[in-house]
Image (cartoon, rainbow, N blue to C red):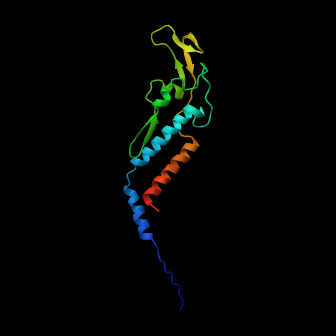
Amino acid sequence: MSGVVVEVHSVGLDEALTRIEALADIETYPLMERVGRLIQERTRKRISQDKESPEGTPWKPNASRTRTLERSGQLYNSIDYLTTSDTAIVGSGLVYARIHQLGGTIKPNTAAALAFMAGGQLVFASSVNIPARPYLGLSADDEQEVIHVTEIFLSELLGP
């Protein structure tokens, strides 16, 4: 009679399984903090340097010929993040942040016209159309960087 015998000798398998089982109970808040900070930095870079949407579409220049979305620096400085153990939210609390992201028309609430400076001159208008200049969101590079940060986080947990 003939037969086949297979012997499996595992080296480190028990240790690896223990590490993998420990992942079920990991605290993910530190990872979300890293992701939130990363996306905050990427969003600020988009405002200060890239001048394009997360999809790579360049923003339309503004009428005053100043640096788009950066005249006072308030929008840049307002970009913040909030994290929980499974979420990272990045955005701005400024009243005008939404219209820059989505675009829209501004009309006066109580006055007959809007008054603002453009090109060094005082301008009066019955309404102003603000083009969308999306600065929030994830680019393909941002998504890859989030994956990279997650891989580093997991490798730190699992060890060598």
Quick check: 116 left or right of 58? left
Quick check: 98 left or right of 119? left
Residue 125 on image: x %, y %: 55, 11
Q: Which of 3 and 82 is in front in this view?
A: 82
Residue 103 on image: x %, y %: 54, 25
Residue 124 on image: x %, y %: 55, 9
Quick check: 73 left or right of 63? left
Residue 106 drawn above or below residue 54: above
Residue placed furthest toward the top: 112
Residue at left 47%, top 33%?
79
Residue 28 drawn above or below residue 132: below
Q: Dividing the picture into quarters, in which one does residue 78 lie?
A: top left
Residue placed furthest toward the bottom: 1
Residue 32 drawn above or below residue 45: below
Q: Which of 25 and 74 is in front in this view?
A: 74
Residue 59 on image: x %, y %: 61, 29
Q: Dividing the picture into quarters, in which one does residue 34 lie?
A: top left
Residue 113 in view = yes
Residue 52 in view = no
Residue at left 47%, top 57%?
155
Residue at left 44%, top 41%?
88
Q: Total label count? A: 0
Residue at left 45%, top 41%?
36
